[in-house]
Image (tube, coloured by chain):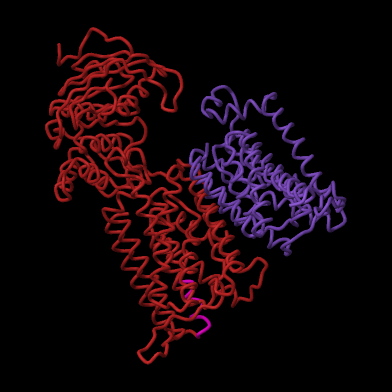
Chain colours: A red, B purple
Amino acid sequence: MTRRNAAVQCAVVIAVAIAVAFLPLRAGNAVLGDVALALLVAGPAAGASLAVASGRPTLGMSALASGGGYVAALLAVHGHEAPLDVGLGTLTGAVEGAVLALLGARLGAAGFIALGLVAATASAALVGALPRILGADAGLGPVAPLGVTLPDGRIASLTIAGSLHAADAVAAFVTLIAIVAVATGRGARWRAVGGDRERAAATGVMPLLAEVEVLALAGAIAGFCGAVAAHIAGIMTTSGFGPEAASVPLAAALIAGRAGPGMAAALAVLEGVGVTVILPRMGWVGPPSASALGAAALAAVAIALLAAPAVAATRRAPGRAAGAPSTWPSLAPAVVSGLTVDSLDVRPPGGGPVIVPGLRLEVGAGEVIGLVGANGSGKSSALRAIARAAGGDRRVKLEPRARTMLLPQERGGFPGCSVGETLVLAARSGGRDRRAARKAAVDWLEPLGVAPLRDVACDLLAAGARRRVDLARVLLSRPSVILCDEPLAGLETADREAVLDILRAAAAAGAAVVLCDHDRDAVAATATAGVVELGRVEAAPGPAAA
Amino acid sequence: MSGGVALQLALDSLAAGGVYALVALGVHLAFAGSGVLHLAVGDTAMAGAVVGGFISAHGASAPLSALVGIAYGAALGAVLAVAIVEPTRGRVALAAALLALGGTALRQAIVAVLQQPVYPFPSLRTEWTVGSGHLRASDLLTIGVVAALAVVAALVLRRTRAGAALRVTAATPDAAELCGVDTGRVRLVAFAVAGGLAALGALLAAGRVAPSMGGAVALTLKGVAGAVVGGVRSPGGACLGALAIGTVEVLGGYWWGGGAGEAMAYGAGVLALAVRGLR
């Protein structure tokens, strides 16, 4: 999401919130209470959208809201009223979100979805069992309306219109927080992790920290709304932990996609208004209940929109050819170092037998060495093995503090981030402060030929532009050693030349480059330190060394 | 604890675990065929069982109703494969999310059509009293059917072309296609068989819990938890994990109440997901 889109969404949220504030002039109390509850679904939906952006889609967001509501209700029953109970409900949501992130640290997105649903259902079972343990004070049951204790001991409670205004303000506040958070620098890190965890880690972003941050924020947002909703509803039940409630935020977030938290919140609120205001007043009694029907309808819309072949979802933005070699900026590595690999046994990434025994190669700072071989000969595995062993294995020798970076063969850039955000993230990981990182990123846009596409998501770029951006991402991190895995694959002539120009320029600035590709002619023409054919070194070095 | 109660708890655990084992086997088959975690398997199961109960309530014999219910569960599994898994091929997280949402839509669609939340299904009512424990004939039937199906599943997976196609697709789908395996058909069959097996599980459990769409998510999660505990990539492991989940649930319920038993079963699933992941 660009900052401009975020600003537009914020303006729309504020305008809608102001409009809703005037609803008491046109609607009766019965409608106001239902609308107030529908508005508070914005929190879980905005939280789910944040989670989706960071690659952690979850069915647990409504359970986080209910967890916050349950803690607030439990505290209220024991005499602790707002704002303390709401604050602790919010904190509970944040802690639950962080714990969920930590529990799911080893899971892919699919496993994380299952984890969220299992954890939500376990919470429901646990909370449902608590009354047997705690008796009547278990927090399930009537909850007093929001109010404050006056100096004379009386309690001033909000009217129904006041509750609507409170819900309106809370919904707008949490939605604005989510929009701003996902659009700013921290949000770019979260989206980078969501787009490509491995690349993000290589670019200096800590994936687990980012996931804990985003789910804690999402949990806090949901918990805040849940705590306020418990007071406005006047009763706390376990229904919010149920599967129907769980599906609404996720469906809204998936439908909203990159439109972000504002759109997700709007969809969820519309669904909420539909099931709490419109359907009952149309005479719907079910079965299924109005809320279950609304959840099912939203789920069906999500399936209809998203269950489409992947190719139909992408729209390519071509970019133009890159500039001349002399214009490449910011190429000097932070630490100048060569690379020596001595007797490294290479195995496939998932483990298994040795496929390249005793790999040896040596490339000095400012040199390019080629790596060629037939399909399946272990070229990619060799590069990954070198990247893994660098800095921690005596068979791979580098200067102290030298940094090795891998340019992976597949994809490129961060799918959830724009070109500009990708370059800024990379520049920050190269040790620059925020201002210098932005300048470095801007300096790269024009020579890469992507200046007009600064705000376009990387996965919408054409293959050549995407590869150039990914190479710039690697170089902006100022690595000492660059391991390039088939950087020319699938590129047309102009893009191939641009990529080779960047690599030559990086080497000229002091980087050590290992270039692996199927195009033996291009590799031989670029390599200045010889070409290795997995196990033996060919005699002829490249033209620069000749 | 008397010997009779211990025997009853053992049979209860085996029966509950056996039902979850059929669901877990379905989760394994779907995962092996597509790499997708089948988060709607309980919905196809309960839909099949509810339809079986509906037909039975309208005069059909129990075996015929069960067959129709199993076929319905299998058909719904195939529909999910065609409507969700195939179009989202290569995007397993999105497929899992849409399956979970598809389960929500399916549950409410069934409820809207049949207009009745619970449909009892005929089951064996015979009980024996041993000491202070009660042994149910329906539990023995469940255990026998699950044991027989486990043997059949093992033979099919190891000795037949279909089993080989599934194993090759699970290991390397691209290579499987290059070898002439129709992986789309493998996914379709895997989801259909998963739906049928899970529906059979829900019908076998009808002696304890009448089929209802409200119990679909619980069935999904216990099957997934079992598969994860034992290893979602191994059919035998998935079944053994499901037996462990059933045992935890029954023993937890015996000592601390039904809600606590459920919470412990889900807790085991959460722990297994956190520690093992989808391996």
Residue A457 placement (x, y as % from top left): 32, 46
Magenta stretch: residue A37 in it? Answer: yes
Q: Quadrant of residue A266?
A: bottom left
User: In the visual, does A55 lie left or right of B219?
Assistant: left
Q: Residue at the top extreme?
A: A539
In the displayed structure, B138 sits above or below B170; it is below
Name which quarter of the figure residue A295 lies in: bottom right
**Res. B75 in view:** no
What is the magenta segment's predominant secondary structure? helix
Q: Residue at x 82, y 50 (%)?
A: B136
Q: Residue furthest front?
A: B2
Q: Which residue is drawn at 70% across and 52% down?
A: B46
Highlighted magenta segment, given as a residue range: A29-39
**Left or right: A242 as drawn, with respect to A194:** right
User: Does the magenta-highlighted stretch encompass residue A200?
Assistant: no
| Closer-to-camera residue (A232/B72) | A232
**Total number of numbered discs in the rendering:** 0
Q: In this view, does A33 lie to the left or right of A203?
A: right
Q: Is residue A264 visible?
A: yes
Residue A180: where, in percent of width, then height? 30, 61
A443, above or below B162, in the image:
below
Q: Is residue B256 above or below residue A160?
A: above
- Residue closer to the observer: A486 or B273: B273
